Amino acid sequence: RTANVTLAGGQHDPTIDAGIYPATGLATLGDYVWNDANHDGIQDAGETGIPGITVTLFSSTGAPISTTTTDGTGFYQFASLNPGTYSVGFTAPPGYAFSPALSGTNTSIDSNANVTTGRTAPVTLVSGENNPTIDAGLYTSTTLASLGDFVWYDTNKNGIQDAGETGVVSVTVTLYDGAGAVLGTTTTDGTGFYQFTNLTPGQYSVGFTAPAGYIFSPANQGGNPALDSNPDNTGRTANVTLAGGQHDPTVDAGIYPSTGLASLGDFVWNDLNHDGIQDAGETGIPGITVTLFSSTGAPISTTTTDGTGFYQFASLNPGTYSVGFTAPPGYAFSPAVSGTNTAIDSNPNVTTGRTAPVTLVSGENN
């Protein structure tokens, strides 16, 4: 059947065509749902198929086409398919969760279902193809893990949940796997709490989206991980490793208004007399690469000096940073911290090009 066609008076529409081809060019896909006893996403010896699992075939647009169930040994198949693009969805029975997807290097024995949705990535079939590699591992979810927990208004900007500081409603929170792929999103509830549950043991990180006009508090302050803020300036946390059955309620985020942002800079110059002091007549050097590092030494941002040798990193959260300069070929760094005037000395280490840590307070321009 075609879609409806509207004809005007006297119109002839010569475009209603149909292509056909021999049924011998039809394709198939499958193949197997198994009990992944060790949760590794690979079909190991002794791990058996699971009968009666509902499997749905979807078109390239995501529309369901057909449904079947796995047979007594865990196998299924969709046959007589036109060449094209499809995806497959598996329905986990109560008490089961999906194994990690695409583990190992052998596509015929891995699991293809997304751990959250149960859906596979699109699969394109050509005429006559049989693809028996679309599998799903399942395991009992008694050993699943979870994490959370809280986004709050950090009124004193110290990165610690103090008495009287309240939760933030409807903040978008994103869960990533250990490699940085997005697994799912949620929002904080009416009291600022969120949670990701039914997680396979492994590594995860969390991303928070700050509301407009707000920035993140300093990370990992104080000695109590249940009360600190975890994301960096971009809103992402470090990876968290969850064991089977573990709940980690310490992945929190403090935010505060961005009116107290800080900045730092300032100048790279041609030190003609090598004394580490900006003397009259010594000019700036354009195009020098400058990198901003966090308190842990992770690179945050990179810029280059302008046409007169100046640079700046703006809109920074209060906290501790260092700066690294990349000397062009044929250049070396001047002696560091010469003289008594910090506004005209050189700061980078002569060997590494990195400065000592610099702590910025709210609203400071260094």
Image (cartoon, rainbow, N blue to C red):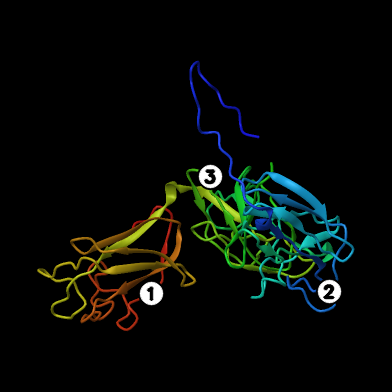
Q: Please report whichever mark, 1 or 3, sits nearer to the chain's N-terminal start.
A: 3
Give the total number of marks visible in the rendering: 3
Q: Give the structural element (helix, strand or loop) at label 3.
A: loop
What kind of residue is marked 1?
Answer: Ala
| Circles 2, 3 touching at the beta carbon (< 8 Å) | no
What kind of residue is marked 2?
Answer: Glu
- Distance from label 1 to label 2 (Cα)? 56 Å
The circle on residue 211 is: 3
Splitting the image into 4 quarters, where does residue 80 fall?
Answer: bottom right
- Residue at figure coordinates x 19%, y 70% from the top left: 269
The circle on residue 47 is: 2
- Distance from label 1 to label 3 (Cα)? 33 Å
- Distance from label 2 to label 3 (Cα)? 47 Å
x%, y% of residue 126?
61, 59
Q: Give the structural element (helix, strand or loop) at label 1.
A: loop
Badge nearest the viewer, 1 or 3: 3
The circle on residue 356 is: 1
